[in-house]
Image: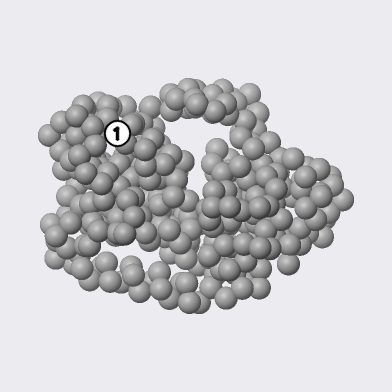
Amino acid sequence: MRIASLLPATTEIVAALGRADDLVAITFECDHPPGLAAPVVVRSALEPGMTPGEIDRTVRERAAAGLPMYDLDREALRAAAPDVVLTQDLCGVCALPGHTVAEALDELGLPDVAVHSFDPHTLDEVLTGIGGIAAAIDADASPMLSDLRRRLTGLDTALADVDRPRALVLEWTDPPFLPGHWVPELVRRAGAVPTAGVDGGRSRAVAWEDLESPDAVVVTPCGYDLAAAVAQAGPIADRFPDVPVIAIDSAAYVVRAGPRLVDGIEALAHALHPAVVPAPEEVRCAQVSRKGRDSDR
């Protein structure tokens, strides 16, 4: 089966299911696992090196003008000749919308290509959606899902009696955005109580003065790796000098709806409760103070 994955999360899921060699088209953001050889057919309309504030302004301007956030290379997709295309309709800012893909396939004379949309809003829907992708590409997700659920159950048991800090979670820093979709649940599963957020819904912008005083701050800027999250967390630590500020690799472990969400929960659980949850083997989080990074988790 020839698979076009137009979403980093689905690329990661396909690879985790042992089908990376069947990928014939991916996006510019598909960086896991490293070394994917498939051609890139989706690129961002954003310029490299933009600050969070510049990105926010550009996204708003393009949305107001009816301009897309992503460019699909239709001829490259035609040349890839996929049997199935994995896409989404959850967020037009985060990835190429599925209706755009369907329209492009019709334009290219490929109306018989199967299109599978992956649109989870909660952690359980992520896990269920992994099973759906597996079915779409004739793979078996049972071993993976059993392991992910076993690890989540183990965390629930380990954290059953801990004191849970009230955590302010920032999914964007300029302007501040409170999290949506599965992110508040991830924070709860890691042993904290999110001070705000929209379970299963969209993230939303807020004013700094409207934020509640938390016991901890989790900085998880959408699409950024750990180094960038740490850099953005520095000014946040200045705003909240009396509470711990934790930065996490959001691109890998928070906003990408794949199996590594459980890795992110485990990492955040250790950062919040180091005496209860062991440290992961690789660095996924960093504790940040007003002077910069203190320690990695």
In the rendered image, the quadrant that contains the N terminus is bottom right
Asked where in the image residue 91 lies, by quadrant, the reply is top right
Residue 108 horizontal/vertical position (percent):
84, 47
Q: Position of residue 263 (x, y in %)?
A: 37, 59
The answer to whether residue 122 is left or right of residue 47 is left
Residue 296 lies left or right of residue 77; in this view the side is left
Note whether residue 212 is visible.
no
Three-letter residue code for mark 1: Ala
Who's the residue at 56% across and 68% down the image?
Answer: 17
- Depth check, front residue: 94 or 91: 94
Q: Position of residue 13 (x, y in %)?
A: 54, 61
Which residue extends farthest right?
Answer: 109
User: Can residue 35 be seen?
Assistant: yes
Query: Viewed as shown, does residue 217 lie left or right of 66?
Result: left
Q: Considering the numbered disc 1 on the image, is that residue within a helix, a strand or a loop?
A: helix
Question: Which residue lies at the image location 24% right of the left edge and 37% below the top edge?
Answer: 293
Q: Position of residue 101 (x, y in %)?
A: 71, 47
Of 88 and 15, nearer the camera is 15
Q: Which residue is mark 1?
A: 233
Q: How many numbered circles are shown?
A: 1
Residue visible at 48% across and 22% down in the picture: 54
Q: Is residue 293 left or right of residue 57?
A: left
Give neighbour class at mark 1: few <14, some 14-19, many 20+ (Cα, 10 Å): many
